[in-house]
Image (cartoon, rainbow, N blue to C red):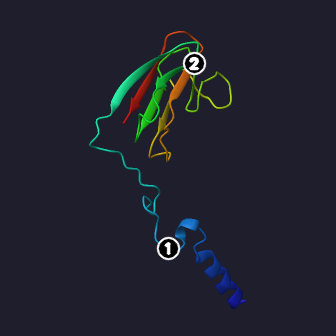
Amino acid sequence: MIRLLFAAILALAAPSHAFAQALTAPLPNGDNLIGRVITRPVNNAGTIAGCTVGTSSAQCLAAATATQHVGLQNTSNTAIIACSWSGAAALNAAGSFMLQPGQGRDYGPGIGWVPTGALFCISTQASVSLYVELN
């Protein structure tokens, strides 16, 4: 009986969480014990541009313009914008991503990649401003 009680106490005291396990290999570059380390360039002022999006797909950003970060934001209160990094953008279609009114999207170290293709966008309304920040 005492052995069973002692075994039960040991089982409860043993760490069962994944984060409580011993580190047996080196961490990959950019990682630490808490999570990924995200670095942002401090020596690049970046570029703040804009694009007026209409009801036909048009190019908003040339290919390979950004090298470290791209931030997009639909500045409209009512219009929806669809954009594509792989050719003509289309509303509610595969290959295009939607930005609801006021919604933004970031690409860069935090998500692991920066698009290199040209950015094409289309909107549900004429003359909608798309905020574009890059470096």
* Cα separation between marks 2 and 1: 49 Å
Q: Badge 1: how crowded within 10 Å, few (<14), some, or many (20+)?
A: few
Mark 2 vs mark 1, foreground winner is: 2
Q: In terms of depth relative to the viewer, which is nearer, 99 or 66?
A: 66
Q: Which mark is residue 25?
A: 1
Residue at the farthest right position: 1
Q: Quadrant of residue 135?
A: top left
Few, some or many C-alpha atoms within 10 Å of disc 2 (few <14, some 14-19, many ≥20)?
A: many
Say what amino acid the circle numbered 1 marks: Ala
Q: Which residue is mark 2?
A: 57
Mark before the other along the chain sequence, 2 or 1: 1
As helix, strand or loop, the secondary structure at mark 1 comes to: loop
> Relative to 28, is 2 above or below?
below
**Quarter of the figure that contains the N terminus:** bottom right
| Residue 93 position in % (x across, y down) | 68, 26
Q: Nearer the viewer, residue 37 or 46?
A: 46
At label 2, the amino acid type is Ser
Residue 51 lies, in percent from the top left, at 44, 19
Element under disc 2: loop
How far across and down, in percent of the image, does residue 46 sit?
A: 32, 34
Residue at 46% x, 67% y is: 27
The residue located at (59%, 77%) in the rendering is 14
Which residue reaches farthest left?
43
Residue at the image position 67 percent from the left and 84 percent from the top: 7
Left or right of 103 in this view: 95: right
Residue at point 60%, 24% (across, down) = 89
